[in-house]
Image (spheres, rainbow, N blue to C red):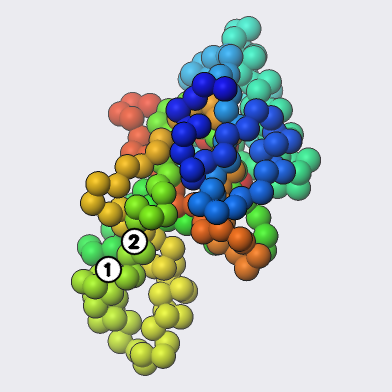
């Protein structure tokens, strides 16, 4: 299989949904990619959906109500099948038409929005699934190429000043405010773009996880272009 991810130790590339969900993460591998070259006109779907808010959830009825060309119908069938596969797995996939996410501008020294490199956390064993059908795609970053923001000395000192509480409660403060989920790329870090059409499974931070969680971020959207993203 010729692709742009096969030489990377972080990523396991597979050729089916079954392999995607049954491939165990181990070592430095914390991302799996069902590598696909999708047929169909996803741009047509985006052009016919109605953006109600900056993030608009699209349900099956919304998709089925669209009058589409043959290429658009092919794209719709792929999306509906992906949603069905994940739902049958017990996941709760969401298809989102995105203009942009909300920015976190409350603090000038640390950001906790999805445009910041971060990991997902869950109290139960789960994974993050995502696929970008149209628009800019997300990035991931090898764990060794990033440092937790709360460990950056100047950021940590400012967080301590913000906390203004007992030292023994500082770590809880970082956790409760999600500061510990966010990462800063090291100098010369090289993010990996997930590109369009591939269905990804990313490791999440949870008690039973055997590997480091996958560091990822939402992309800056292309001017005048909506994203169509499946995520759960």
Q: How far apart are marks 2 and 1 (CA)?
A: 7 Å
Q: Is residue 183 visible?
A: yes
Q: Is residue 109 above or below residue 89?
A: below
Q: How crowded is mark 2: few (under 14 residues within 10 Å), some or many (20 or more)?
A: some
Q: Is residue 170 above or below residue 87?
A: below
Between 58 and 172, the one nearer to me in the picture:
172
Image side of residue 137 versus residue 74, left or right: left
Image side of residue 41 versus residue 171, left or right: right
Residue 184, percent from left and from top: 31, 57
Helix, strand or loop status at disc 1: loop
Which residue ends up furthest to the right in the rendered image? 88
Q: Which residue is pictured at 33% across the width and 30% down the height? A: 222
What mark, if any, has residue 147 been given in the picture? 2
Tell me if label 2 and label 1 are in contact, CB under 8 Å: yes
Residue 53, percent from left and from top: 46, 40
Residue 192, percent from left and from top: 40, 38
Q: Can residue 100 be seen in this view?
A: no
Q: Is residue 38 above or below residue 147?
A: above
Image side of residue 110 versus residue 231, left or right: left
What mark, if any, has residue 152 been given in the picture? 1
Position of the N terminus, as image quadrant, is top right
Between 136 and 141, the one nearer to me in the picture:
141
């Amino acid at each position: 299989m010729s692709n742009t991810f096969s030489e990377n130790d972080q990523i396991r590339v597979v050729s089916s949904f079954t392999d995607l969900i049954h491939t165990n993460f181990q070592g430095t591998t914390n991302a799996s990619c069902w590598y696909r070259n999708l047929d169909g006109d996803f741009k047509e779907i985006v052009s016919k959906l109605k953006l109600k808010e900056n993030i608009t959830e699209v349900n099956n009825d919304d998709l089925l109500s669209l009058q589409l060309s043959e290429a658009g119908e092919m794209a719709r069938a792929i999306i509906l099948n992906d949603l069905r596969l994940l739902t049958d797995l017990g996941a709760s996939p969401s298809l989102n038409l995105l203009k942009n996410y909300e920015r976190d501008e409350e603090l000038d020294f640390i950001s906790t929005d999805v445009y910041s490199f971060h990991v997902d956390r869950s109290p139960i064993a789960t994974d993050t699934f995502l696929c970008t059908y149209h628009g800019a795609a997300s990035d991931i970053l090898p764990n060794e190429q990033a440092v937790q923001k709360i460990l950056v000395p100047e950021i940590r000192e400012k967080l301590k000043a913000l906390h203004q509480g007992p030292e023994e409660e500082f770590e809880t403060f970082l956790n409760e405010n999600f500061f510990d989920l966010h990462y800063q790329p090291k100098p010369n870090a090289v993010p990996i773009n997930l590109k369009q059409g591939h269905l990804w499974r990313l490791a999440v931070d949870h008690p039973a996880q055997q590997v480091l969680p996958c560091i990822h971020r939402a992309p800056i959207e292309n001017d005048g272009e909506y994203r169509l993203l499946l995520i759960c």
